[in-house]
Every structure is written in C-alpha cells, then in structure tokens.
Amino acid sequence: MEKPKSDFVWMNGKFIKWQDSNVHITTHALHYGSSIFEGIRCYNTKNGSAVFKLKEHVKRFFESAKIYRMEIPYSKEEIQKAITETIKKNNLKECYIRPLAYKNDEGMGLNPLNICVDVAIMVWYWGSYLGDGAIDVKVSSWNRMAPNTFPALAKAGGNYINSQLAKMDAVINGYDEAIMLNTNGFVTEGSGENLFLIKDGTIYTPALSDSVLKGITRASVMCIAKEMGYILKEETIPREMLYIADELFFTGTAAEIAPIKSVDKIKIGNGKTGPVTQKIKDKFLSILKTGEPKEWFGFV
C-alpha cells in the first residue's frame, strides 16, 4: 500500500509540515489505543470540491469521543472549518480525510481521565480501497467484538486491532477482504466496511445491535435504496444466508461500494457485480460526481 503524503497537517489549531507532524514515544494512544478518528472523502464534483457528509462525519467523531470520555477542545464547527481549510492548504481538489483525536504524552497507565486530548487532521489522495471490480472474501476466523466489551458504535483506534486480525487472515489466505461474525455467530461487517445482502429482491443489512458500526455510507446507501423503491430490512443475518444470497456488497468511505463475487470460494449470483448492486452503485457515484443533493456535502 502506498504511504499517505501531502504537504501540511492541521495539528492543534495550526498547520505544520507533514514530516514534522510527530508525537512523543510516551503518547498514551500509542500504548493503549486511546484515539478516535474518522474516514471522510472530498470529491471534485461539478459544483466544486465537496466533502461527502461532512457534518455527519464530524458528529460521529464527537460521539466516538463522548463514548470514550474524551473532551475534544474544539467545537464541531471549528473541526468542520479546519477540515476544509486543510484541503485548501494542500491544494487538493479531491482527497481522503483523516481527523484524529488522541490522548497525548502527558501520562502513562490505564487511567486516561486527566490526560489531554490532541487533535490532528490529515488529507491525501487515496484511490478506491478495494479496487474497482468485484472481490473475493472469506468469513473470518476472528469474531467481531461482543456487545459490552468494546463499543462498536465508536470509531476508535483500539477497536481496529480486531479488524486488523481479520484483514490479515483474509489476505494471507488469498482473499481481498473478510466478513466478521459476532460472538453469537451472526453476520456483522467487513474488517472496515458495512455489508449489504440482496435476496429475492429484498435488501438486508445487519442491525446495529449486532456489533455494527453506524456507517455514514451505509446510511446513505439505505436512503438511496429506499428512494429507488427497494424493500430494505435491518435484521440479524445468519452466516449461511451469505452463501445463498443473490448479491452482496460492502460500503464504506474508503471502499465506497465494493461488490462481492464469492464468499469462502462459493460463487455469489453469477460471480459478477449484480444488477441491484450496480444500480445502487451507479446512483451513488452519480451523487459523488455531481455534488447533489447539496445538503449531503460540505463545499470547500
């Protein structure tokens, strides 16, 4: 994977050069995973550079911080402004955006309550995370964290140790991505993407109560599907339903919409991008290209 790179990083209210955006070795987040972050994209639309669902992403950023008792020393409006200013500072028309809040190097030990929070915003060009074609996935041998262990609704750095295990397991065994089950054996999501399943014309996605991240792209796709007239259900999905699905696809900021052609070497549908998936993907990409509806974007 190509290393991310741009010219400037917004860090604690000021711009510094990318190569100077360092943290101390005693940084609490480095030792204990005490960080929260967002993944956001800016698109070069016909209406100009625009950040997809900027307000919604920043809202989730603050919600993740609240769950982990982290006080972000800026308002939502200040973070939104800092994001658009960082894009302009780096002269980027489109990019991936990574806001990060983390416990800094003022203390060690498991209790982070009195440790200050630093905030940084990075931007760089990043293509499609899973490529443009349909992908092969496997059901991971690693489960998604159980309820009341790690908070699945928080997009926290420490949570993604779980995801890394699933991703490495998939890649080492020749797959593009993993699908994770919860501790009850039901379908949750990919290592970093939400999941949709299509069967007999109905679209299904796992319920949030099944240890699923409340994805911004997930919510957008649900809105698109309903507007297109599809029946959509959020419910518990058993593993075996993956194998008899007519279509499957992932959603996420990095992955956008990624069709799945096989699970555990069992072909899904005709082994290509399915017709419903393609219609939803085409509509989603059209929104990203046009920057409309404008209320879905924060314009730079």
Image (cartoon, rainbow, N blue to C red):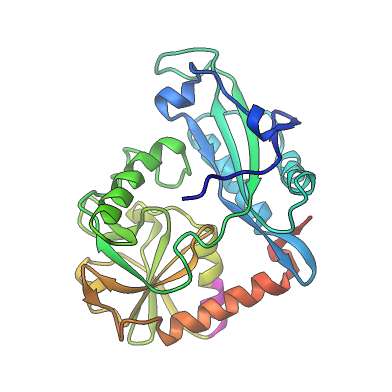
Residue 224 is a magenta residue: yes
Quadrant of the drawing holding the C terminus: bottom right
Residue 97: x percent and y percent?
Answer: 62, 49
Is residue 85 visible to the viewer in this orientation of the structure? yes
Q: Nearer the viewer, residue 113 or 44?
A: 44
Left or right of residue 25, residue 205 in this image: left
Residue 125: x percent and y percent?
Answer: 62, 54
Choose top left, top right, bottom left or bottom right for residue 253.
bottom right
Query: Start and end of the magenta stretch?
Result: 223-228
Q: Is residue 193 above or below residue 77?
A: below
Q: Nearer the viewer, residue 5 or 82?
A: 5
Residue displayed at 50% across by 12% down: 107
Choose top left, top right, bottom left or bottom right for residue 78.
top right
Residue 62: x percent and y percent?
Answer: 59, 40
Residue displayed at 32% across by 43% down: 162
Q: Is residue 240 above or below residue 92?
A: below
Residue displayed at 62% across by 26% down: 118
Is residue 181 visible to the viewer in this orientation of the structure? no
